[in-house]
């Protein structure tokens, strides 16, 4: 476990704290995307992050090292 100070006088942040925070982000991102009616492909085009990687983030799976960004057509 790695412990780091966020800033002088702050509480220590551990690797477990970071892992817990990251694990909670996926479901929140998915809920926000679905609330806006966006698809993984739409978010992928807007961010340059592949749909597979976005799906892995939303479901808290490790990243696929072979995933590459996709190119999306821009609307005029």
Image (cartoon, rainbow, N blue to C red):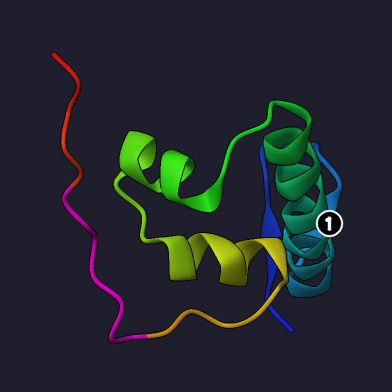
User: What residue is shown with label 1?
Assistant: 24
Provide the residue span drawn in magenta.
Answer: 65-71
**Left or right of 55 on screen, residue 59:** right
Residue 20 position (above or below residue 11):
below
Foreground residue among 28 and 76:
76
**Left or right of 53 on screen, residue 75:** left
Q: Position of residue 65 (x, y in %)?
A: 33, 86
Q: Residue at x 75, y 34 (%)?
A: 32
Q: Residue at x 20, y 44 (%)?
A: 72
Q: Position of residue 20 (x, y in %)?
A: 84, 65
Residue 74 position (above or below residue 40):
above
Q: Residues within 10 Å of mark 1 (few under 14, many from 20)?
A: some
Magenta span: chief secondary structure: loop
**Left or right of 38 on screen, residue 64:** left
Q: Position of residue 76 (x, y in %)?
A: 13, 13
Foreground residue among 62 and 33:
33
Secondary element under disc 1, as helix, strand or loop, is helix
Q: Position of residue 49 (x, y in %)?
A: 36, 54
Foreground residue among 55 and 19:
55
Q: Residue at x 16, y 37 (%)?
A: 73
**Left or right of 72 on screen, residue 18:** right
């Amino acid at each position: 476990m790695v412990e780091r100070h966020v800033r002088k006088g702050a509480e220590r942040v551990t690797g477990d704290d970071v892992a817990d925070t990251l694990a909670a982000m996926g479901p929140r991102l998915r809920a926000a995307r679905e609330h806006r009616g966006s698809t993984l492909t739409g978010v992928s085009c807007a961010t340059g992050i592949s749909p597979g990687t976005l799906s892995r983030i939303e479901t808290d799976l490790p990243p696929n090292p072979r995933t590459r960004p996709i190119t999306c057509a821009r609307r005029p």
